Amino acid sequence: MTSLKARTKQNNGRHSPTPSVKRVLQPTRSGQPVLISGGAGFIGANLAHRLLSAGQSVLLYDNLSRPGVEQNFQWLQKTHGDLVRLEIADVRDARALRLAVRRASSVFHFAAQVAVTTSLSDPIQDFEVNARGTLNVLEALRARTTPPPLLFTSTNKVYGDLKDVDLRANTTRYEPSDPDLREHGIGEPRPLDFHSPYGCSKGCACQYVLDYARSFRLPTVAFHMSCIYGLHQHGTEDQGWVAHFLLRALENSPITIYGDGRQVRDILFVDDLVNAFLLAHRHMRTLTGQAFNIGGGPGNTISLLELIALITELQGHGPKVQFAKWRSADQRYYVSDIRKFSIATGWSPQVNVREGVSRLYEWLRDSRRETGATVPDLTAAAVAGNGHQSHRASHLAAGAGRQIRLKSLSRARRMYQMNGVNGRHAAKKLVKALSR
Ligand SMILES: NC(=O)c1ccc[n+]([C@@H]2O[C@H](COP(=O)([O-])OP(=O)(O)OC[C@H]3O[C@@H](n4cnc5c(N)ncnc54)[C@H](O)[C@@H]3O)[C@@H](O)[C@H]2O)c1
């Protein structure tokens, strides 16, 4: 196995964490692993990498339903060996979850149905995974004599479409007319207003997480997160728009902008989010039972049109762009007021938009160069079916122990056409496709 020092060196984050975060990263030497549900996903894999690099063992609990996340697990395994383990299981399986939680020293609950679009086509599945799945996590924690801390990732969608916020528009972006809102963004006192089944299921889950701190004294914290982006993100049109735009540009495929492209978001590079997780964990005693708005904040905002301009600069030519009508519940403007968490923990984002987007662009470009198309376009898959391949298929693919490399887009497309097909035949076809 690689030494701790060597592993720390391999960290793909180029900026060093703030001193307070460094202290959090001291290996615990605890025999108990940190449990990350949805740990093979984009955010989970980045957190796992940081913890593993500090010598902490990690158990990933994931049903591998998101296309492409197997690659994240393979990367973690290759880098950290036995320190990382994967349990292929579903958060809807309360029994399996209870067994996993029983061994955990801390729990980060990220597993979710992550797209608004998918929640609109299958609200029941969205509810079962996001709301019921979270309740299963909380019940598993409540069954412990001394429940370990829980961090839950909620979303800015809990604040609704923010239609009442008076906006003015310039050539490339919307911004609030109110100077205070312009300067600081949307704060936690903003009333909750769940929009879309995804907003409802995540919002509901978040309320349970906060209430379990109140009713059962569980140590829990929730983040209402804005757009997160970074390495190991398998962005689609439905979720992970920064990575998705970059991928489309790299493929020379058209980018569809829903609306006029002047929507503004504060984007946060995943390394900064991981710093926030570790600080929340460290300050759990004082933060418990609270929700925090987490994003890049007013210093790290970008509109869709501005991202197109940045891509043009990075590539040396403009990507193809087409426009379509606005999506329901799309916020014209969302920027997080991050002061509450910053004051409580000393956290602030370190990676600015230009640096973060350039790093993600380079990573996507290099990954594609190395493997043909290791980072496939998953848009077609996300639009057809529910964007999730069958777990059985994933399980078999992982069990086959084969290097998952998609040499061409047509192969990727074939693989993802099998989405949602749960039979043995489809699983076999998947394994065959992956091994070619
Ligand atoms: N990425 C963002 O910009 C963003 C913004 C706000 C909130 N969030 C939240 O952060 C969390 C992580 O997001 P992400 O971007 O890493 O998404 P992701 O899709 O990359 O990761 C989610 C992981 O959960 C797994 N999963 C899905 N359903 C599951 C189930 N039923 N049982 C077990 N595992 C399951 C998937 O296979 C995937 O690996 C999610 O809860 C999401 O709602 C993300």
Image (tube, grey):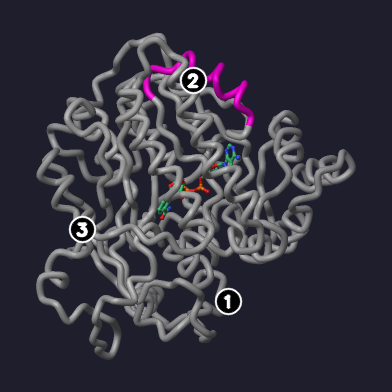
Residue 76, magenta (yes or no): no
Where is mark 1, residue-wise? 253
Relative to 323, does residue 205 appear above or below in the rendering?
above
Foreground pick, 104 / 194 = 194
Q: For marks 3 and 2, give the CA distance.
A: 32 Å
Where is mark 2, residue-wise? 101
Where is mark 3, residue-wise? 187
Foreground pick, 414 / 262 = 262
How busy is the neighbourhood of tag 2: few (under 14 within 10 Å), some, or many (20 plus)? Answer: many
Residue sitting at the far bottom: 171
The part of the chain drawn in magenta is 93-106
Image point 34% across, 76% down: which residue?
163
Relative to 150, does residue 193 appear above or below in the rendering?
below
Amino acid residing under circle 2: Val
Amino acid residing under circle 1: Ser
Q: Mark 2 vs mark 1: which is more N-terminal? A: 2
Mark 3 residue element: loop
What kind of secondary structure does the magenta stretch mostly adopt? Answer: helix
Image point 55% across, 57% down: which residue?
368
